Image: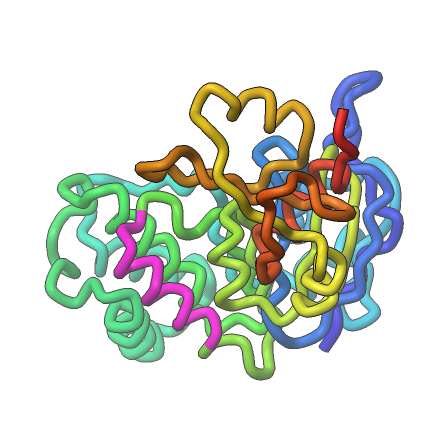
Amino acid sequence: MELTIENVSRRFGDDHWAVRDVSLRIGPGVVGLLGPNGAGKSTLMRILATITQPSSGSVTWNGVDIAKRPDEVRRVLGYLPQDFGVYPNLTASEFLRFLAAAKGLGARAARARIDQVIRLVNLADAANRPIGTFSGGMRQRVGIAQALLNDPQLLIVDEPTVGLDPSERLRFRNLLADLAGERIVILSTHIVSDVEATATRIALIQGGRLLRHALPEELLRDVAGRVWTWVVASDELAATKARFAVTATARRADGVLVRVVHDGQPAPAAEPAVATLEDAYHHAVGGGATSAA
C-alpha cells in the first residue's frame, strides 16, 4: 500500500502557486501534514482526494495514476474536508445512511457500520437528533464518522480537531492512532500537538513547498541543544522577539518567560531547555534560529 506524490504543483491564475513541486512517498501509518494557515495543505489534500487536478506532476495509488483512474482511490478513500457541509434537518443517523448509500454500502452493512462509527466518535446519545441542533464540535464528529463509513485504506482529514473541546480532541487523537495500522492516514493541521500525539512521520509545508519529511525524532534533533529559556521584563519582550527566534512565551510574576531557538547562549540569564516539536516546527517554518542584532 503506497501513495506517491511526484513533483505536484497547483497554480491558480497566472502567478499564484498554492502547491509547488511537492514530492512524497507515503506508506501505512499516520503522516502529519503540518504548516501555518495558507501554506497549501488543503489544496494538496483536495488533489489527493481527486477533487482538484494538479497543474503539473502526478499522484499514484499503488502505482495507478489517480488523475487518469480516480475510482481506484475513491473506492478506498475516506475524506474529511476542512469545510464540511451537512443537511441540518437530517439526524446524524439519517445523514450517515444517505452517505453510506452514496458510497455503495448495502443496507445491512451500512446499519452495522453506522452504529460502529457513531460509537467511535461518541455520538450515540445524539444519533437521532437533527444535525442543525448540534454544536460545531458535534458536527465535526459527524464529519469524522462519514469519513470512516467505508473503512477506508486511505483516510485524509483536513483540520479535523477544529471546534473540538480538549476531551474530544484527545479522543480523536487516540482514534487516529488506533486506525493507523494497515492503512494510510494523512492528518493536515496547523496544531502541533495534534501531530505530536499521533504522527509516525511529519511533513512540514510552507508557501506551498515541502520543507521537510521526517520522523518526529529527526525534527527534534534539528533543534537539540539550541533551545533556551529565560525571563525578560514585559517592556523588553518586543525587543527580544525582534532579536531572537522566540517559539513561546509565558507570563509570570517576575516577567515573561521566553523560549528561543538560537545557536549559542542568547543571553547571560538563558538556560538550556529540552527541545519540543513546537520548537522544531517554528524553527523550520520561521527560517531557523537568528543571530542577535
Q: Is residue 243 above or below residue 213?
A: above
- In this rendering, position of residue 211 left or right of residue 109: right
Instruction: Measuring from the top left, give residue 8's x and y in whole percent.
Output: 83, 45
- Residue 221, relative to residue 92: is it above or below? below
Seen as rendered, the residue at the extreme front is: 268
Q: Please give the range of residues in magenta.
A: 164-177
Q: Is residue 43 visible?
A: yes
* Residue toward you, 205 or 269: 269
Q: Is residue 169 magenta?
A: yes
Q: Decide if residue 106 is on the left or right side of residue 8.
A: left
The residue shown at (55%, 21%) is: 238
Residue 237 image offset from top left, x and y in percent: 51, 25
Say which quadrant the C terminus sits in: top right
Residue 147 lies in the magenta-colored region: no
Residue depicted at x 81% and y 66% = 64
Give left or right: position of 39 versus 197.
right
Depth check: 172 or 70 in front? 172
> At 68% from the left edge and 27% from the top edge, which residue is drawn?
243
